Amino acid sequence: MPEIVAFLIEKTLVTIFVFIVVLTVVAFTTWIERIVAGHIQMRYGPNRAGPKGLFQVAADGVKFFMKEEFIPDRANKVLFVIAPTFTFMAAGFIMAVIPFGDRIMIGGREVLLQIADLNIAVLYVLAIGSLGVYGIIAGGWASNNKYSLMGGLRASSQMISYEIAMGLAIVALLLDHGTLSLRQIVLNQQGAIWHWSVFSHPIGFIIFYVAAFAESARVPFDLPEAENEIVAGYHTEYSAMKFGLFMFGEYVHMVLGSALIATLYFGGWSIPWVTAPEEPGLLWGLATFAVLWIKTYFFVFVYMWVRWTLPRFRYDQLMNLGWKRLIPIGVVNIFITAALLVVFQHLGIAG
Amino acid sequence: MQTIIFALLALVSLFSAIMVVTRKNPVFSILYLVLTFFCFAGFYVMLGATFLAAIQILVYAGAIMVLFLFVVMMLNLREPEELEGKNTLWQTMGAVVAIGFGLLVLAFLGRSPGAGVPNFQPGEEAYVMGGAKALGKLLFTEFVFPFEIAGVLLLAAVIGAVALAKRKRV
């Protein structure tokens, strides 16, 4: 079999696998969210549709498709219809570079459990992440509704503010790892558990996590859709599956954001104190795959936990936190990290 | 393969660039401009400048155009009813600039060695040169002076913007 055909088949299979797994997992995350919310508020949560309410996901899906598709009279129809897909696509594109597992050998062929191991993966994630806001702005503007427009405006200023903080946190991490490839960053964190970057970059981790919360626009940073101030923000006029896409995009964003945090700061798919076997088979691949999802779901759980615990920020508090707290701390963090790296290099201690 | 991708990118970027200047509604102009920037990023990737491609999307498509959109929506610019008369001065200037750039393109077409869609493979020197590592090394050794000058200029612009925004209104 020629190399190019084998390559195409391999990448197609990996892509389909990752796509199906991520979308299925994300669909069930909506169910997990309801269960977590229920228990935090001391009630059962969904328990009618199917065992443990598991079919609630399907019921919601059917509901989204059966409802009336409503387009406001003076809305900009083209933009109104395609805006939700912007959000969804931008969130989904991130899955292309997340290392979901280690390499495995199948019939003497090395297969990466990752769609593409880009040499600029970290920048790619930041770049694609910054595009998600177009869906929200376009949707808010196209609705021809003042509240929608205000939601869109809030979203754009919020995203730009917190992207800077996120970038600064990542710069400090990159100084240490010396690579932009996510797979290489995971490989660097193998071995003992204290090789995880979170132990060498605790401040960067906190900044990154807060910024990731703000980027996903969930409570306490859900200013773009603050329902007691601006009705439902940018998706006030959306109904049926178009609203469903916005919703689903938010969940994809949350799950992949958590996967990214696990990858950058918590060793990704690597298992502490376990080294990869000489001839990694399917079992090793599945083990690393499972480990990444366990780490990811811990962070997804924290997202939900925070959502049902904290109240929403006021708009000026949000801007103050972004510009006057996180960004200066991020800059200082870079300087400290760089200085420590130079000191360690002089003393001859690696990392 | 490379030629097909190049042709596709070129068609889309030309189409969206024309749409940018012909749309009456500024919101659509901006969205088409974002599409144009995407195509440019595609060209950079084909030339092996992966770092530049990522920065192109991150800075231009992701941040600056969001600000443009923010301002346009804030002012709620709609389709202008009627342009204020025929402004012949602007039209002449536009024509001069367009012809000038057209001549420049023609001049460079004549100088290009062979019909040139570059065909770099990962690992080739030109390809590696566009990566983040090579670019960083160059910026901090050979071109450190221009790099620092650019940094100081940007700093001055930031301070200027803050000073203007902070100025007390009379």
Image (spheres, rainbow, N blue to C red):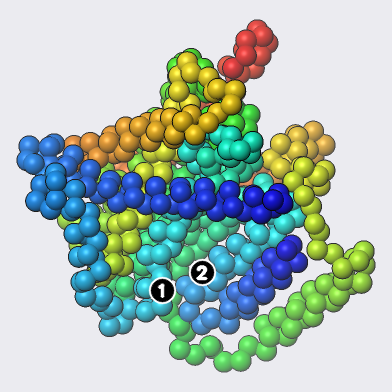
Amino acid on which the number 2 mark rests in the picture: Leu
Place residue A148 in its image quadrant. bottom left
Q: Position of residue B35 (x, y in %)?
A: 57, 67
Which chain is indicated by disc 1? A
Amino acid on which the number 1 mark rests in the picture: Leu
Q: Position of residue B28 (x, y in %)?
A: 49, 74
Q: Is residue A321 above or below residue A157?
A: above
At horizontal 66% and vertical 59% (from top left) the residue drawn is: B42
* Front residue of B39 and B61: B39
The label shown at residue B31 is: 2
> Is residue A332 found left or right of A229 in the rendered image?
right
- The residue wearing badge 1 is A79
Q: Is residue A271 above or below residue A73?
A: above
Q: Going by the picture, which residue comes out furthest to the top?
A: A347
In whole angstroms, how far apart are the C-alphas of marks 1 and 2?
10 Å
Helix, strand or loop at mark 1: helix
On the same chain, marks 1 and 2? The answer is: no
Q: Of the residues tagged 1 and 2, which is closer to the observer?
A: 1
> Is residue B112 found left or right of A111 in the rendered image?
right
At horizontal 37% and vertical 79% (from top left) the residue drawn is: A77
The label shown at residue A209 is: none
Helix, strand or loop at mark 2: helix
* Front residue of A255 and A307: A255
Which chain is indicated by disc 2? B
* Front residue of A291 and A128: A291
Q: Is residue A274 above or below residue A319?
A: above
Place residue B36 in its image quadrant. bottom right
